[in-house]
Amino acid sequence: MDATALTAWLREFARLVAENKDELTALDSAIGDGDHGVNMDRGLTAVVAALDAEPPETPSALFKKVGMTLISKVGGASGPLYGTAFLRMSAAADAELDGPGFAKVLRAGLDGVVARGKAAPGDKTMIDALAPAVDALDAAFASGAGLADAFSAASEAAARGREATVPLVARKGRASYLGERSAGHPDPGATSVTLLMRAAASTLGAAG
Amino acid sequence: MKKLINDPADVISDALHGLAAAHPELRVDFENRVVVRGDAPVRGKVGLVSGGGSGHEPLHAGFVGAGMLDAACAGEVFTSPVPDQMVAATQAVDGGAGVLHIVKNYTGDIMNFELAAEMVAADQGTEVVSVVVDDDVAVQDSLYTAGRRGVGATVLVEKIAGAAAEQGRPLAEVADVARKVNSYARSMGLALTSCTVPAAGRPTFDLPDDQMEVGIGIHGEPGRRRVPVAPANEIAEMLVSPILTDLDFTGGDGVIAFVNGMGATPLIELYVMFNEVTQLLAKNGIPVARSLVGPYITSLDMAGCSVTLLKADDELLRLWDAPVNTPALRRGV
């Protein structure tokens, strides 16, 4: 995986978020402040524009540009969380990534989200989709799976993790003010992470 | 939706241009959406920066000026500003004595200010200390929530820490004063109506004509419970009781009592509420040392009010009484 392949992944993520903008916003209206779809779409539109203007030449440069752009454009809680994830991925990325190398980079991103948001699995946050996805990637590569199978497993793990947030009571973010009333809805951040992993399956997985 | 706006997407920009036109003593950086004291940076003085989502006016930009904030960052409506804005504000007010960030306790605000402080430290070496305001007793404070929201006490923190900075106190002391105000202040709010975010175009939640929501925040978040509309004396009891249960207000030099309007409630009703609040405090043996009544931290066009009580001592009262010269709070100048 080089910068070109990874750029295709993030462009597909941007496309999926734009396509699902209203759904993300509706989910966030139920238990948050109703701006997740609009904010992520604004940020990723800026990311695509930045990548068009000056295509980064290395994975590290790509992730850095994505992280800085999201931090500058998204606001709310999602901007710092996604932004920190990509900045940590930038620091962890080599010039060329194989499957296990990508899994290591994505785990660095996950660690960044945990450090920034101080949330744990089960708090009804994006971590509940991202952590199982990273675990699934590691497990798949450890058992010798190819890119297609590994990214497909990661995408499914993220979707299952997102479904598992439905009954949870939120402990972080604005949804936590609702207490018990936050149960019965999927977490919007976990939902956008499923789009990130679905995009990985259809781009990075297909390339392998 | 009936609002005095042009394109909903332009509300913040249009309002900042209005603020700049009305207050030539302030500098407005339209690109970064930062409002700065005209004479900033004030050499040798600790700079005070705050900011948050828009929709709470006059907070924060209305409190920029001598004796209060040096700069305020305006986010989208009810959405935290981004770190670039806070970095620009911090640079603009750094007079060599360090900068205090006053942050309301919301997940987005905390993380964006945290990133900004990291970016400033890495780039310029300006010393930044952050103080978090979390005074809303409606939210249970535990490890299992985002913690209490920052509401009415934010106004008191900005005024009192602003006075301490104006006296030339060092950063650590100004931060201590801000923390002391936060630790001695408690708030509780109530909504008679929801509010309408311009970009959304309809009320954030449904509240029937005969119901009110007790324990609301300042972003149209639902409150603790929904109850039938009641007379002002009963409403005052619903707001003051949980505050007095949460902190012992006796034994000091009385309280600074702040009855705040949520945006659409007329001042006459706020004075009705203030009368009820003072009677309740008298019944509990708590003298009112100073008062503040008016819409100072609002939630767009929400009707309702919040009560904030700050346990006062000699130091806090002297800082409260110090001169202040901002668009929304001006006295002694």
Image: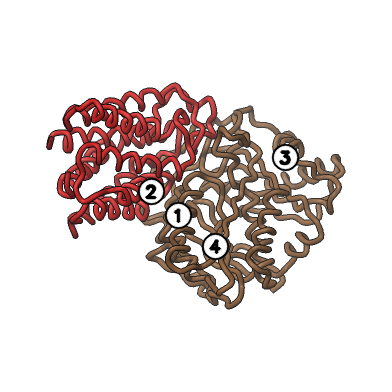
Chain colours: A red, B brown
The image shows residue A187 at horizontal and vertical percentages of: 40, 31
Upstream in sequence: badge 1 or badge 4: 1
Residue highlighted by disc 3: B243
Residue highlighted by disc 1: B115
Closer-to-camera residue (B177/A158): A158
User: What residue is rendered at 56% in x and 46% in y?
Assistant: B105
Q: Which chain does tag 4 point to?
A: B
- Say which quarter of the image contains residue B323: bottom right
Q: Secondary structure at mark 1?
A: helix
Q: Residues within 10 Å of mark 3 (few under 14, many from 20)?
A: many
Answer with left or right where residue B124 lies relative to residue B214. left
Q: CA distance from mark 1 to mark 4?
A: 12 Å
- Give the amino acid at mark 3: Ile
User: In the drawing, what numbered circle is on residue B128?
Assistant: 4
Residue highlighted by disc 2: A84
Q: Secondary structure at mark 2?
A: helix
The image shows residue A112 at horizontal and vertical percentages of: 40, 44
4 and 3 marks in contact (CB < 8 Å): no
